[in-house]
Amino acid sequence: MTKRLKEGFLWGNSVSSMQTEGAVNEGGKGPSVYDIREAGEHTSDWSVATDSYHRYEEDFDLMKEMGMNAYRFQISWSRIIPDGDGEVNDEGLAFYDRFIDAMLERGIEPMICLYHFDMPLALAERYDGFLSRNVMEAFVRYGKLVIDRYKHKVKYWLSFNEHDLFANPGISFRVGGVLNTEFSEKGMYQIQHHAMVAHAKIANYLHETTDCEIGGMIAYSPYYPASSHPKDTLAADLLDDFTNHAFLYTFTHGEYPAYFTTYLEDRGWTPEMGEEDLEEIKKMKIDWLAFSYYSSNVINGRDIPEDAPITSYPKYGGEENPHLDRTEWNWQIDPIAFRLMMRDMYARYRLPLFPIENGIGVIEELPEDEYIQDDYRIAYHRDHLQAMKDAILIDGVECLGYLGWGLIDILSSQGDMRKRYGMVYVNRENHDLKDLRRIPKKSFYWMKQVTATNGEDLSDIE
């Protein structure tokens, strides 16, 4: 048995459109819900981001130099259809034509994600986003349009970024594009269901009309029990089921798991769903499971009220793990959990895996010599890559590739430029755009070594 990663392993970068593109008033783009968010003390607005709309060729050159052969990016829905439904913006399509061609010219495999939470503002204002079936159908029309346009150039597809977040009570309404309705659990699961039906329709259309591949994606958050107490173990297992496996199971089995539907029915939270919805989900096929992974969590089940919703358990019983280091954003650094979850996912579902977001966010300042020696970032990626290799080479997991998150600095999901994931520094701050120059960090040169050896050499560099 070989102990090397397979030829053609995909190494690359992963981003969203609103965190990179900017140019919100150019090229016929319509506004999204992000475009109306104002800057705060530690957040930028989204009008420029890292200006990849104008600088993507420079960024692709840097990716190519790093040895990357894959890039997962997002199509901006409102750049293609300014109101979210209706008239198509040919200028937006022409931009993505050039964008994708520039990638392919450099030997970089594109992966399109159709939605990364930037709901067209018109649909948010009129319908409250994915609370409405109208928006679900509009999304499917948009997705089919994009598939028809790029099916001959793009092999890898995603419908939604981190599908499980549609059922996360802290952010469900925000990522679902809801502006006017007060949060409720029933509404949250309606959003999740509409997104699942939309994903199924997109996956079914893709397989009926192309030879492309599509994955289902979640933000994987593994939970450890705080102790050997059975209540801690039960809480950890329930959280794992409801925040991770309910969606992975549905992607792979074509139906919601019984524990999920029973739980919603008992609490009166079952969303409206027709037989045609369930038929679409039943027909659904996915080719691989994609996920983001950043950190693990600990839960104490003894401190949780009996009537607390499972997805709210961390509010009552979340604890710090005394055995792990944490980032300055209080995220636990845990590469072993990366291996464990890959082992478990592959054993349960027997589909190839694709980690498409992983990385460490750090506050960094550009020194006088303009060389950031980010050994902490090298250590993070080295340890996670080793864990991934152990899952592949020791545990037999089939894995398509590894995409880091924001490996050229981008705005964080909250719009905070201080939280930098990149191996390339982008010279801007939250309230000072400076010159937006791209400046390689030490980790840039380390990643060149990793990709040149197809992951074999993870050693430090001088």
Image (cartoon, grey):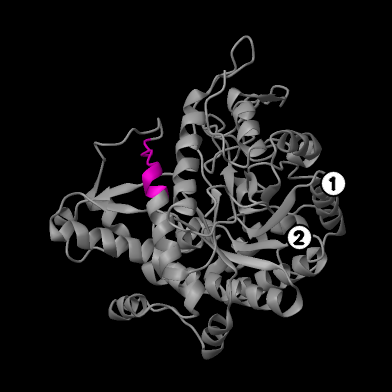
Residue 96, position as x, y percentages in the image: 80, 53
**Residue drawn where x is 41% and y is 34% of the image:** 329
Question: Can residue 360 be seen in this snapshot?
Answer: no
Q: Quadrant of the C terminus?
A: top right
Residue at which label 1 appears: 105
How far, Cα to Cα, is label 2 from label 1? 13 Å
Q: Quadrant of residue 431?
A: top right
Residue 331 included in the magenta stretch of the image: yes
Q: Name the residue at 83% across, 46% down.
A: 102
Q: Which mark is residue 318?
A: none
Amino acid type assigned to the residue bearing label 1 in the image? Glu
Residue matched to label 2: 154
Q: Which of 75 and 241 is in front in this view?
A: 241
Residue 379: give x, y in percent of width and height: 47, 30
Q: Give the residue at x 83% y 57%.
A: 93
- The crowd level at tag 1 (other Cα within 10 Å; few <14, some 14-19, many 20+) is few
